């Protein structure tokens, strides 16, 4: 679309004119720009605006900088009220960095984050994949391999990457250790299948693809880019290939063949594909990011400089992570630690609040190092912990806060203490709790001490490691019988990377498991009146923080996180008098109280309190009661521990 000459604001007529012009340049059968506008005016259009993040933030044309993404967003914002009033429907897709929370709020559209592939559908996918090949015997082996390797978890909830794993496993290749190794294997296998000759033919093909991917990131000699482009013209593709040929005469000997090479890559490589209007793009943006990362060290420039100059650009994050993985794999882990020490040196509260991209890159790079079992220097760990804790206190943008919090947990979250440590609890005294009809506090047995946080995965791991599932003394008779009959040996989602970061609340636990753990640490589950007393405080608040709901204050559906958060990630939701965290949202909490003993169908159902990430604010009120069968386990159910004495064992 024509993006004008330097302007940054579009109105509805500008956008409709640009869309109609785009239709006219490549009209589908039976549609013209004029007819498209007529459908739009009549409310008969369904607009699918796919890949906003792939629209460049800025481009330079004839010495004039244009701002395609800003123009498109402003045009959509202005057009939406009239479009929706007419009856049109609009679906806009984007990676998070292309449209942040503020952008979603600005447009006023309902937001629906793309869900990762859950374990049951992943296993079904694998089974059908091998069944189609007549190799069903491989299904169970691959599923078992995936379940047994936590490092593969980030690779298996994406259908495209899961397909690649199936191919690699079917061909007898080892499963990759990380995302970089996976893409390296994918590219090698795709090119081997498309160019089955010897490696001397495939190597130049891969180098050309790298040059194009890198050029799509930084531009060519005459038109540098500030952010990567998701597609480019065939002319630019040829310019990038020509530049590569001049700089690499050992690979390219005949400049006259540039157009033929472009055609070959578009029609044969399987990685670079043609788009409408003589444009080119990679099959998936992640291939462009991987290949650009492969190219960077070959340019002869200083790799460290690339990290310093590009780390604050969110659109570069995936590419830099590929580059970081390649460097620590091909060089050494020590280089990676020194780089991160230099990058974190200029990060402070002010800079992180202004731009979280650098801090998030550092967090994800550290996550990679931990996954590879590299030793992270103590001073680097400590600097990152301070950075992450400050970002949580400052309540930076939620996606960044989540990434920083997850990494904090992997390095060791200093807030999380053993549940035999008095500092892990808050005291609830007489006078706390809900009011009766006359305004008096409903009496409870006080004082008692309740966990400052829900029980986390790192805390629950101690129960697992000490043989808690093999020791009957911690279990009730009914709970032990259930565990034995169901052959339960860990929480339901213990090996699922979405729920198992060390400082996320443990979820997927039944009432019986929560009860056994609480006994193991010398406590018990709170009764619901005790839980509510801790939540409402002395003033009997509606919510732990007060009487008014505030958007984004805790991890409910309104926050849009769609997963459990590291505990304490929402400081504003802290119980106002006691400092207890996560009493609203994140995960439901089991209580040692029957929900309704008179219920003939479920007389044994136990109370759940607090709401969860999966449900709306209505369920997060401190007075709200929920109940489920004690055998029930789900991805939004956890618990916290109560103790009746402050004399805790060491």
Image (tube, rainbow, N blue to C red):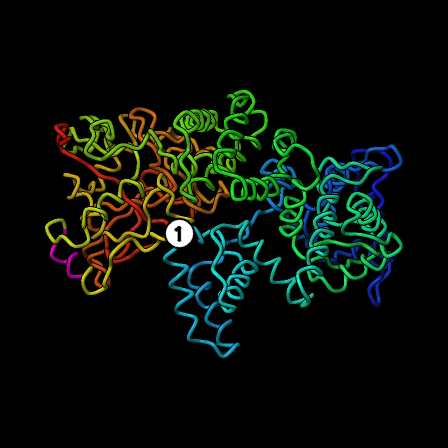
- Find residue 109 and report its image quarter: top right
Q: Quadrant of the C terminus?
A: top left
Q: Which residue is at a point 19% across and 46% down the rendered structure image? A: 466
Residue 17 location (% of width, % of height): 85, 47
- Describe residue 88's horizontal placement relative to residue 634 as left or right: right
- Describe residue 24's horizontal placement relative to residue 266 as left or right: right
- Describe residue 264's horizontal placement relative to residue 190 as left or right: right
Label 1: few (<14), some (14–19) or many (≥20) C-alpha neighbours in 10 Å: some
- Return the residue at label 1: 150
Look at the image and give the residue range highlighted in magenta: 475-482
Residue 306 location (% of width, % of height): 65, 33
Residue 387 location (% of width, % of height): 46, 26
User: Residue 336 magenta-drawn?
Assistant: no
Q: Which residue is at a point 45% across and 33% down the rendered structure image? A: 553
- Find residue 262 and report its image quarter: bottom right
Compare residues 184 and 394 and report the one nearer the observer. Answer: 184
Magenta segment main secondary structure: helix
Q: Which residue is at a point 51% across and 21% down the rendered structure image? A: 348
Mark 1, secondary structure of its residue: helix
Establish if 494 lies above or below 586: below
Establish if 407 lies above or below 141: above
Compare residues 29 and 192 and report the one nearer the observer. Answer: 192
């Amino acid at each position: 679309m024509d993006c004008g000459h330097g302007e940054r604001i579009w109105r509805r007529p500008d956008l409709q004119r640009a869309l109609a012009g785009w239709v006219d340049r490549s009209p589908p059968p039976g549609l013209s720009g004029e007819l498209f506008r007529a459908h739009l005016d009549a409310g008969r259009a369904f607009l699918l605006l796919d890949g906003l993040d792939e629209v460049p933030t800025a481009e330079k044309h004839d010495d004039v900088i244009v701002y395609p993404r800003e123009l498109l967003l402003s045009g959509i914002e202005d057009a939406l009220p009239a479009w929706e009033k007419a009856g049109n429907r609009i679906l806009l897709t984007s990676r998070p960095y292309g449209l942040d929370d503020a952008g979603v709020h600005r447009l006023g559209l309902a937001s629906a984050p793309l869900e990762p592939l859950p374990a049951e559908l992943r296993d079904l996918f694998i089974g059908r994949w091998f069944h189609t090949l007549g190799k069903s015997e491989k299904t169970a082996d691959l599923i078992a391999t995936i379940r047994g390797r936590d490092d593969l978890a980030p690779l298996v909830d994406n259908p495209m990457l899961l397909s690649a794993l199936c191919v690699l496993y079917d061909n007898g290749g080892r499963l990759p250790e990380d995302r970089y190794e996976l893409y390296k294997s994918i590219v090698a296998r795709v090119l081997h299948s498309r160019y089955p000759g010897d490696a001397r033919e495939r190597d130049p093909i891969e180098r050309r693809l790298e040059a194009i991917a890198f050029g799509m990131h930084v531009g060519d000699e005459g038109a540098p880019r500030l952010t990567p482009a998701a597609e480019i013209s065939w002319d630019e593709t040829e310019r990038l290939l020509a530049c590569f040929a001049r700089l690499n005469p050992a690979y390219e000997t005949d400049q006259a063949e540039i157009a033929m090479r472009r055609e070959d890559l578009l029609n044969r490589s399987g990685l670079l594909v043609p788009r409408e209007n003589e444009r080119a793009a990679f099959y998936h943006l992640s291939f462009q990011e991987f290949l650009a990362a492969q190219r960077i060290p070959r340019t002869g420039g200083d790799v460290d400089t690339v990290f310093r100059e590009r780390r604050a650009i969110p659109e570069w994050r995936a590419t830099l992570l590929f580059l970081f993985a390649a460097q620590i794999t091909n060089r050494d882990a020590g280089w990676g630690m020194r780089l991160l020490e230099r990058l974190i040196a200029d990060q402070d509260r002010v800079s992180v609040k202004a731009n979280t991209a650098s801090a998030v890159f550092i967090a994800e790079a550290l996550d990679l190092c931990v996954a590879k079992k590299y030793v992270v220097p103590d001073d680097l760990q400590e600097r990152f912990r301070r950075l992450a804790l400050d970002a949580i206190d400052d309540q930076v943008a939620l996606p960044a806060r989540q990434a920083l919090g997850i990494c904090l947990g992997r390095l060791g979250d200093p807030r999380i203490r053993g549940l035999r440590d008095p500092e892990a609890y808050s005291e609830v005294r007489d006078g706390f709790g809900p009011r009766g009809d006359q305004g008096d506090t409903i009496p409870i047995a006080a004082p008692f001490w309740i966990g400052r946080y829900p029980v986390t995965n790192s805390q629950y791991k101690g129960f697992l490691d000490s043989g808690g599932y093999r020791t009957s003394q911690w279990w009730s008779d009914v709970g032990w019988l259930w565990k034995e009959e169901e052959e339960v040996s860990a929480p339901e989602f213990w090996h699922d990377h979405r729920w198992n970061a060390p400082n996320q609340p443990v979820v997927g636990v039944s009432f019986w498991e929560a009860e056994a753990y609480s006994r193991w640490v010398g406590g018990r589950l709170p009764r619901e009146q005790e839980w509510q007393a801790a939540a409402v405080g002395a003033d009997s608040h509606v919510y732990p923080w007060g009487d008014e709901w505030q958007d984004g204050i805790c991890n409910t559906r309104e926050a849009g996180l769609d997963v459990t958060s590291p505990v304490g990630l929402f400081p504003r939701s802290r119980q106002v008098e006691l400092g207890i965290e996560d009493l609203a949202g994140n995960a439901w909490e089991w209580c040692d109280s029957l929900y309704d003993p008179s219920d003939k169908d479920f007389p044994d159902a136990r109370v759940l309190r607090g709401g969860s990430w999966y449900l709306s604010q209505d369920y997060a009120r401190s007075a709200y009661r929920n109940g489920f069968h004690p055998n029930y386990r789900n991805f939004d159910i956890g618990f916290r521990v109560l103790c009746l004495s402050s004399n805790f064992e060491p």
